[in-house]
Structure formats: structure tokens, C-alpha cells
Image (cartoon, rainbow, N blue to C red):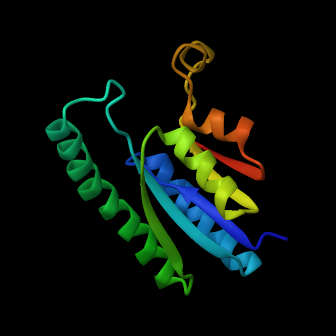
């Protein structure tokens, strides 16, 4: 059924919960599993030094999270491929899904209010509405 699964990872506890669900699904369906993180870059552009600093800090934080997911998968016999992306999280995730032909995305949902989603948007909400494949939301 599902051959290729993606789980986006950030620093939230719900992302760790989504990773666990994705690992379980990969085991159940004997599917390939990818975990990605997106380092958000400054929206206003920023100076070259600021952008480099944001990238450096993001790489440190997210590389650690991705390694944790990879280790959890390996402990259960699942190979987890990882990749670090840059940009706006929702846009980068949707582009990555489309480019790489995933069958399923498992994403954590923090349960923000309707007003928050309307004013700020939500990565999980955008992924649900724009992903060209099935999406499972793991709620907090």
C-alpha cells in the first residue's frame, strides 16, 4: 500500500511522536522512510552574515533531531534516510513531496486555533491541503 513515507521533523514533541508513527508504518508496510527537517531562513532576506548564522544554528539543531529519528528506526530494523532543507517549511516540504513521489506523509499537528491558522497558517495544515499524496496527522 505505502512504499515511500515521509516524516517532517522539527524540534517539537509532536514531531517525535509523528516519527514514531512513521517508523511503525514503515515496518508494517515494509516501506522506505525519509525524515526531513527544514531550516527556516529569514523572510526579510537578512545580511549574508545573518543568513549564514541562521543556517549554521539550524543545521546543528535539526541534524541532531534527524539523527535521533534515524537511530530510533535503526533500533527497529528500519533504515531512515535523512535530508536537511532550507526555506519556508511548508513550501519546502510540499516541493520535496512532489519532487520525490511519496505515497504518504506523517506530520505532527500541534492543534493551533482556527484564528492562528487563519492569521499565521500552519505547516501541517498547508501540507494537508497541498500534498499530492495521503497525509496522516498525528495530534498532540
The residue positioned 20% from the left and 46% from the top of the image is 52
Residue 134 placement, left or right of 59: right
Viewer can see residue 140: no
Viewer can see residue 28: yes
The residue positioned 51% from the left and 64% from the top of the image is 35
Task: Tell me which corner region of the image, top left, top right, bottom left or bottom right, holds residue 101.
Answer: bottom right
The residue positioned 47% from the left and 54% from the top of the image is 9
Q: Is residue 99 above or below residue 51?
A: below
Quadrant assignment for the N terminus? bottom right
Q: Is residue 73 above or below residue 17?
A: below
Quadrant assignment for the C terminus? top right
The residue positioned 58% from the left and 12% from the top of the image is 115
List the single residue furthest toward the left: 49
Q: Is residue 44 above or below residue 59?
A: above
Out of 1 and 12, give the one closest to the viewer: 1
Looking at the rendered structure, the number of numbered marks drawn on it comes to 0
Residue 71 lies, in percent from the top left, at: 41, 77
Residue 109 lies, in percent from the top left, at: 58, 39
Task: Tell me which corner region of the image, top left, top right, bottom left or bottom right, holds residue 12.
Answer: top left
Residue 41 placement, left or right of 104: left
Task: Tell me which corner region of the image, top left, top right, bottom left or bottom right, holds residue 76.
Answer: bottom right
List the single residue furthest toward the bottom: 77
Residue 60 placement, left or right of 27: left
List the single residue furthest toward the right: 1
Amino acid at each position: 500500500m505505502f512504499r515511500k513515507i515521509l516524516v517532517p521533523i522539527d524540534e517539537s514533541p509532536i514531531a517525535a511522536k509523528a516519527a514514531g508513527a512513521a517508523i511503525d508504518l514503515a515496518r508494517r508496510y515494509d516501506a522506505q522512510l525519509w525524515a526531513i527537517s527544514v531550516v527556516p531562513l529569514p523572510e526579510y532576506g537578512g545580511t549574508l552574515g545573518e543568513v549564514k548564522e541562521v543556517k549554521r544554528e539550524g543545521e546543528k539543531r535539526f541534524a541532531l533531531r534527524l539523527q535521533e529519528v534515524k537511530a530510533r528506526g535503526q533500533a527497529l530494523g528500519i533504515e531512515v534516510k535523512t535530508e536537511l532543507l532550507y526555506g519556508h517549511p511548508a513550501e519546502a516540504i510540499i516541493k520535496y513531496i512532489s519532487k520525490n513521489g511519496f505515497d504518504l506523509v506523517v506530520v505532527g499537528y500541534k492543534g493551533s486555533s482556527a484564528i492562528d491558522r487563519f492569521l499565521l497558517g500552519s505547516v501541517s495544515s498547508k501540507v494537508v491541503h497541498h500534498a499530492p499524496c495521503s497525509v496522516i496527522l498525528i495530534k498532540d
